Image (cartoon, rainbow, N blue to C red):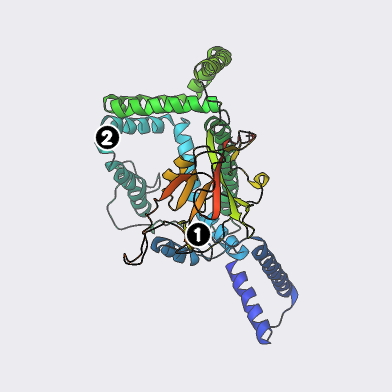
């Protein structure tokens, strides 16, 4: 296949340069087919480039940290999706995946008791490791010696064929002498060979097994852990929290060696065909009839002992009604703003206009919340929210409509904190400095162009619709 690809590329280059090679017969037909296939691949690639979005998690305007920049640089060196590259990599992968399937087949034979002597040998080694965990670091080296080096040596120094030596000369296997065979090596399976298609078959079945296992795990775990059933998920959370607390305290007192030893023997023993048949019969006879009873008892326990707070969380939201003095000397409604637009606010100092909604009906609840009350309520404690925000240069109305007015300074022609005179003490009469805010009623002092009052309303958490599992 690689030769064919190279030949096709050569023909394309020759066609682009204006030269051609003689074509005829069967080879010319194959070349034409390959050229048409290459054209189709390019057309499909162009189509996929238009359909598949480019991976750009950060966006063009998002600043990158040093680590992100290094990761992005390394990722940018990886090729994008390409049908030709995908096909080539799949062929290379499939021709080399055979060793994984051989290991999988050997593991299935080992744990299914196909050869009891092999399974018992594995259990004996497992028992030694469980009883003496310090042998675990030596296990990889033992496997390397017994599973790689020894078979490789035997391949280079094979035993003589049976029957070639007399009984007097037969003394068993001898490793003396020069190597008699070439060194064993691992070669990829050739394309279009039986091993190649066998790997494709095993890969196909493995993908199906993974998909089935994934769907089964999702079916069993997700409904229990995603709080679609809040009572059940809360119970699992409670049990796991208690188990975590117990294990952090008593983990050192648990006989882990004995547990792993008997647990491993039990799992491997359950895979024996005879034991499996007996266990299945006992499950159908004793456990299956009681599964519904246990489930019903567990559901009753959850319903009786797990109490969920069904009342949604509530919060108080505020809005400030702003009014401005008109040229005719009358207060006219301006808008409803989330900020009081006080004299020393950043928006006011910057000279920006207040922002908000023109009408009460346009004020919406925050995202994820909904109104818990039907109407807005006027905050009668204007002094409290003024003091909490440390607002200065205002006059607080403690009666009536609870407006908070700007204090007007006729010497500075501005609103803000009223200070003393700046005439160096030469004025005949010095006005007293006004406090940061004052209590008053209508007409007590000269006021600025803005006044505001605070409205409050309760909101509650919006319940999300139940999602199907």
Residue that protrudes farthest toward the front in the picture: 428
Question: Which dot, 2 or 1, sits closer to the camera?
Answer: 1
Residue density around tag 1, few if under 14, some if 14–19, many if 20 or more, within 10 Å: few
Q: Secondary structure at mark 1?
A: helix
Residue at 66% across, 48% down: 359
* Residue 24: x %, y % from top left: 74, 78
Q: Nearer the viewer, residue 22 or 257?
A: 257
**Residue beneath label 1, please?**
348
> Do the residues bearing badges 2 and 1 touch, measured as CB atoms within 8 Å?
no
Residue 215: quadrant of the picture: top right
Residue density around tag 2, few if under 14, some if 14–19, many if 20 or more, within 10 Å: few
* Residue 340: x %, y % from top left: 52, 50
Q: Nearer the viewer, residue 369 or 442?
A: 442
Point out the tag, 2 or 1, that comes first from the N-terminus.
2
**From what the image shows, is residue 47 above or below residue 218?**
below
**Residue beneath label 2, please?**
133
Q: Nearer the viewer, residue 316 or 129?
A: 316
Q: Is residue 303 visible?
A: yes
**From what the image shows, is residue 81 above or below residue 382?**
below
Residue at 59% across, 73% down: 6
């Amino acid at each position: 296949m690689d030769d064919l690809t190279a030949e096709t590329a050569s023909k394309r280059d020759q066609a682009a340069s204006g030269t051609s090679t003689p074509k005829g017969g069967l080879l010319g037909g194959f070349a034409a087919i390959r050229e048409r296939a290459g054209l189709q691949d390019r057309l499909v690639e162009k189509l996929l480039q238009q359909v598949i979005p480019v991976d750009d998690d950060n966006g063009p305007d998002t600043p990158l940290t040093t680590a992100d920049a290094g990761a992005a640089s390394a990722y940018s060196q990886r090729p994008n999706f390409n049908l030709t590259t995908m096909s080539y990599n799949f062929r290379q992968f499939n021709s080399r995946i055979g060793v994984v399937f051989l290991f999988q087949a050997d593991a299935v034979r080992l744990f299914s008791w196909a050869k009891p002597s092999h399974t018992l040998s594995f259990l004996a080694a497992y028992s030694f490791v469980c009883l003496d965990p310090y042998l675990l670091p030596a296990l990889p080296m033992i496997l390397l010696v017994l599973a790689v080096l020894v078979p490789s040596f035997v391949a280079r120094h094979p035993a003589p064929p049976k029957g070639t030596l007399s009984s007097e000369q037969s003394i068993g296997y001898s490793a003396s002498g020069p190597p008699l065979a070439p060194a064993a090596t691992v070669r990829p399976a050739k394309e279009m060979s039986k091993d190649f298609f066998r790997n494709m078959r095993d890969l196909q079945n493995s993908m199906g097994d993974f998909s089935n296992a994934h769907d089964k795990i999702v079916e069993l775990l997700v409904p229990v852990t995603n709080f679609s059933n809040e009572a059940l998920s809360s119970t699992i959370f409670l049990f796991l929290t208690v188990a975590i607390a117990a294990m952090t305290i008593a983990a050192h007192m648990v006989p882990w060696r004995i547990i792993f030893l008997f647990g491993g023997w039990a799992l491997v023993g359950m895979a024996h065909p005879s034991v499996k048949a007996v266990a299945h019969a006992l499950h159908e006879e004793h456990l299956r009839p009681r599964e519904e009873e246990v489930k019903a008892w567990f559901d009753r326990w959850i319903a009786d002992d797990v109490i969920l707070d069904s009342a949604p969380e509530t919060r108080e939201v505020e809005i400030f009604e702003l009014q401005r003095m008109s040229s005719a000397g009358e207060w006219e409604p301006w808008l409803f703003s989330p900020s009081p637009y006080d004299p020393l606010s950043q928006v006011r100092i910057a000279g920006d206009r207040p922002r908000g909604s023109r009408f009460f009906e346009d004020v919406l609840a925050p995202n994820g919340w909904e109104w818990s009350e039907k109407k807005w309520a006027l905050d009668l404690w204007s002094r409290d929210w003024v003091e909490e925000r440390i607002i200065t240069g205002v006059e607080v109305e403690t009666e009536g409509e609870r407006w908070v007015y700007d204090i007007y300074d006729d010497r500075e022609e501005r609103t803000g904190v009223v200070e003393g005179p700046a005439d160096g003490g030469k004025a005949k009469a010095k006005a007293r400095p006004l406090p940061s805010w004052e209590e008053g009623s209508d007409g007590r002092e000269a006021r600025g162009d803005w006044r505001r009052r605070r409205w409050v309303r309760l909101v509650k958490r919006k319940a999300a619709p139940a999602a199907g599992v």
